[in-house]
Image (cartoon, rainbow, N blue to C red):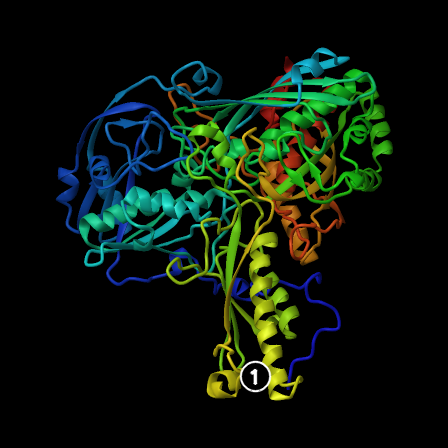
Amino acid sequence: MRAKAASEPWVGRPLARLEDDALLRGEGRFIDDLDPVANTRHAAVLRSPYGHAWITKVDPTHALELPGVVGILTGADVAALSRPFPAGIDSPISHYAAAHETTRYVGEPVAVVVARDRYLAEDALELIDVEYEPLEPILDAEVAVESAACVSDRSFSYGDVDTALAGADLVVRERFRFARWSCTPVECYGVVCDWNAAEGALTAWANFQGPFTLHSVAAGALGLPGSKLRLITPPDSGGSFGIKSAVFAYVVLMGLASRKFGVPVRWIEDRLEHLAASSSSSGRVTHVEAGFSSDGELVALRYDAIEDVGAYVRAPEPATLYRMHGSLAGAYRVQNVAARNRVVLTNTMPSGLNRGFGGPQLYIALERTMTIAANRLGIDPAELRRRNLIAAAAFPYRTPSGALYDSGDYESCLDDALELARYGERREEAEAARAEGRLVGVGIACVVEPSISNMGYITLAEPGAERGLPKSGNADGCSISISALGGITVRTATTPQGQGHRTVIAQVVADRLGIEPKDVDVLTEVDTSTSPWTIASGNYSSRFSGVGVGAVAAAAERLAEKIAAIRKHLGDENASLRRVAGTVHWNPEALPNEMEPGLAVTAYYAAPNLLPPDDDDRVASSAAHGFVADIAVVEVDRDTGEVEVLDYVTVHDAGRLLNPLLAEGQVRGGLAHGAAAALFERHVWDEDGNLLTGSFVDYLAPTAPDLPTPRIGHRESPSTFLPLGAKGLGEGTTMSVPAAIANAVADALGRDDLEPPFTPGRVWELLRR
């Protein structure tokens, strides 16, 4: 029988995750569960103990004498066998997969041992004789910017900022710092590489998340055409949140080891390696000038941002600095905006994608500035924001720097948040508490959450004449096939790491084919030799709900149209899917004339309105734009400096919610990362470049009881540009929470000279000053 269509669409229902059964049974398939090649050898990485040093000697002789050691790949080998990694901007310092002659951060690979097992490989590391001549490290971005370590300096201006500032009744001038911090997924990096000498090709299995632009970066470093680097991801990945995009560097390193020694090579990163040398967010120091009229209108904004990307400009950086370029004005209708962007190198691990990349750094400056201005003007911080928010009637709205905001009702979202938080009462309670000597504060943040990044925005880092081939857009692909018995298989390249892609894909396909989600088999592993993918594919900038789902919908609709045509031709519009499939596979002569045989479709979908930067350096840096209004209430303990979040409200407009249950999880996950950056996490190096936060003893990642339990509200303003109307929402609270909590802490302490994270020790020092 033909499956009956659901009484209501599957999309939009809070369907429980289809992924969870296997995971709860311990039957997930992660990178370390895979054994794809026989006779694999194991690798261990020798890492630099210095932040900056000449490497004067690398002698592997004694290590090679250990029985069971296959070989040792040195930095000199890497330099001889590969090319530097290409990056978004030119840099005077070439970046290879391992250090040669000079090491530039603690943890940088210096050599790789390949041995019978990991135990032996680790033992052999200690027998490699390496000598260093220490050099003076550069560790502070504001010191680096005054030296040759500043590798990019670009300025942008929209409107007349100077005139607007000169005529402003109030000009706020402040400096804001956002520390380096990292994602800490349950599963660290993992790579298995197998070099095929006969074909001159490398197959690599890795828990890589994309973007697949980095496939080209890795292939370029290996000196291979793209078709000769086959990258396969496992079906499951234990989280990523951006950081696993940097696995590509270890694909190159282990690929070179496999090539040199002629054996398959496996490397699984441990937690100490991950904290020291995987990747982290960029650090940023932002000087802001903001002009306001006496009634609170924001008339001008100027940013001077210094971006610390670590020891090398590693692709896709300087993405973090430019990802938010279209949204420099945030949620506000100010027309005069300017920015100076400087990228600097320091002797710390290279930076990369980190949940919300660019958003936390931008909004800590913008939203703190809005609250500081409100206090100085004697206007309530919520009211000041209301007076400047883009009106609902103005959408679609073009920002001064080029973003095209698709839809929204920012004022209503803010009203929802104020009502849910009982904002007026909370402000009165905080004032009463402070009168009693308690340090209670209320903070607010309103942020635009861009999703589906334009592949061309990074080219803004170069002047227009130097950008070369224009880059733009964001696209994805999907293949759907139906077997002779009616089994449905979907393959995409969205590389999920726990978000629930399989569930949502099944809901979308079920709606279009008139079946149930449980009848859809979604293959989550990616194989660049067989999967439908584009250079933009992968899992970043919350692109799944827009272009990932867009490609799924396009493929499913084409397949549904073909099935309908076959049913009509058979004279039975109620024919079961199994009968249709059987006819197609077993009796193709029964199909309509000129119809192709088979029930398999591959479709691609590209987000609209994502052009390359124009001649005036304006760019629609993302395809969709959600909105988040947050309110935090905190209390600071005078004796210990501990910050307790008493209440947290967050209201989101992410367009149409494809699955409200999964949306709730994404909001909570983003909040966890935002609260981590606000209250706990940062990387710290000493004056010699030694990492002081190299384990979870010192790097304070929060646990579940440490995190606030949010009260969550939603509004749905469907995107007018995307096929299902859904926008991203997995990064919004990572962007908003640091700013909201910072404003709450500043309110509690009555001072503005503070920066996250607000750990007890750092807050205690503030209290004692």
Q: In this rendered view, identify the residue nearer to me: 120 or 510.
A: 510
Q: In this rendered view, identify the residue nearer to me: 665 or 118.
A: 665
Q: Quadrant of residue 567?
A: bottom right
Q: Quadrant of residue 516?
A: bottom right
- If the image is split into quadrants, where does the C terminus sit? top right
**Image spot of residue 662 (x, y percent):** 65, 56
Left-right relation of 597 to 636: left
**Picture residue at 22% right of the left edge, 50% below the top:** 259
**Picture residue at 57% right of the left edge, 62% below the top:** 552
Q: Is residue 741 above or below residue 53?
A: below
Q: Is residue 259 above or below residue 482?
A: above
Q: Residue furthest front?
A: 594
**Image spot of residue 450 (x, y percent):** 62, 41
**Image spot of residue 202 (x, y percent):** 28, 54
Q: Residue furthest top?
A: 166
For label 1, the SS is: helix
Q: Which residue is mark 1?
A: 580
Q: Amino acid at mark 1?
A: Val
**Picture residue at 65% right of the left edge, 56% below the top:** 723
Residue 269 visible from this viewpoint? no
Residue 198 visible from this viewpoint? yes
Q: In this rendered view, identify the residue nearer to me: 7 or 392.
A: 392
**Picture residue at 61% right of the left edge, 47% below the top:** 730
Left-right relation of 664 to 101: right
**Image spot of residue 677 (x, y percent):** 58, 34
Left-right relation of 538 to 712: left
Q: Quadrant of residue 337?
A: top right
- If the image is split into quadrants, where does the N terminus sit? bottom right
* Mark 1 neighbour density, 10 Å: few (under 14) some (14–19) many (20 or more): many
